[in-house]
Image (cartoon, rainbow, N blue to C red):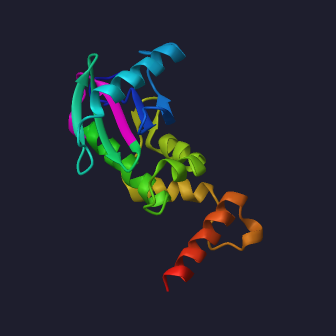
Amino acid sequence: MAESCPSIKNILLLDSEGKRVAVKYYSDDWPTLNAKLAFEKAVFTKTQKTNARTEAEIAMFENNIVVYKFIQDLHFFVTGGDDENELILATVLQGFFDAVGLLLRNNVDKREALENLDLILLCLDEIVDGGLILETEASVIAGKVSSHSMDTSAPLSEQTITQALATAREHLTRSLLK
């Protein structure tokens, strides 16, 4: 790969116990599932005591730069090589973090993420392809992802079960808050 083209090795979304919610690997640095799980556990263990809730933190780990941020019970990680620009990795992380917030209507927690795992995986696909960064603007990422799924303003008969339940939950919440 050309030196001028930044690349991402993986994007991880782990829960508060270090378990996978959504992960995507773009390099062969971790050839087996066990190697990937060991890397995830090691990164989680190294970063869990930090307070990366307000802004992204950066750590060097196994000759990689890991940029990470936490919200509720979710831990977001973006990994690049030790020669990558931290600002670019942080921009990818922020784009993913903000796009997930937009897609989950700012209700970002593990349960909501698992219920909308399809959107999060589409989000990863829109951000990075084969390690190359495609998009970092959260509103553009969320727009592309939501265009793949039905609009919530569509009639309930044209929505999937998950979307219909999300719409119903939203309407119920609004009516209870009035």
Q: Tell me residue 144's x, y (percent).
A: 52, 55
Q: Is residue 178 left or right of residue 169?
A: left
Residue situated furthest bottom in the rendering: 178
**51 sits to left or right of 166:** left
Q: Quadrant of residue 18?
A: top left
Is 155 situated left or right of 67 in this image?
right
The residue most toward the right is 157
Q: Specify the segment rendered in magenta.
A: 75-87
Taking the spot 35% from the left edge, 21% from the top edge, the residue there is 42
Which quadrant holds the N terminus?
A: top left
Q: Residue at x 43, y 18 (%)?
A: 38
Q: Is residue 177 above or below residue 6?
A: below
Q: Is 8 included in the stretch rendered in magenta?
A: no
Q: Quadrant of residue 163?
A: bottom right
In terms of depth relative to the viewer, which is nearer, 134 or 77?
77
| Rendered residue at 41%/34% (across/down) | 11
Residue at position x 27%, y 41% in the image? 90
Please state the horizontal and vertical placement of residue 66, each as a whole percent of the image: 29, 30
* Nearer to us in this view, 13 or 48: 48
Q: Position of residue 113 (x, y in %)?
A: 52, 49
Q: Is residue 79 magenta?
A: yes
Question: Is residue 38 depicted above or below 77 in this figure?
Answer: above
Q: Is residue 66 visible?
A: no
> Is residue 35 shown above or below 16?
above
Q: How many marks?
A: 0
Q: Is residue 32 visible?
A: yes
- Return the x and y of residue 83 as percentages of the image width and height: 23, 23
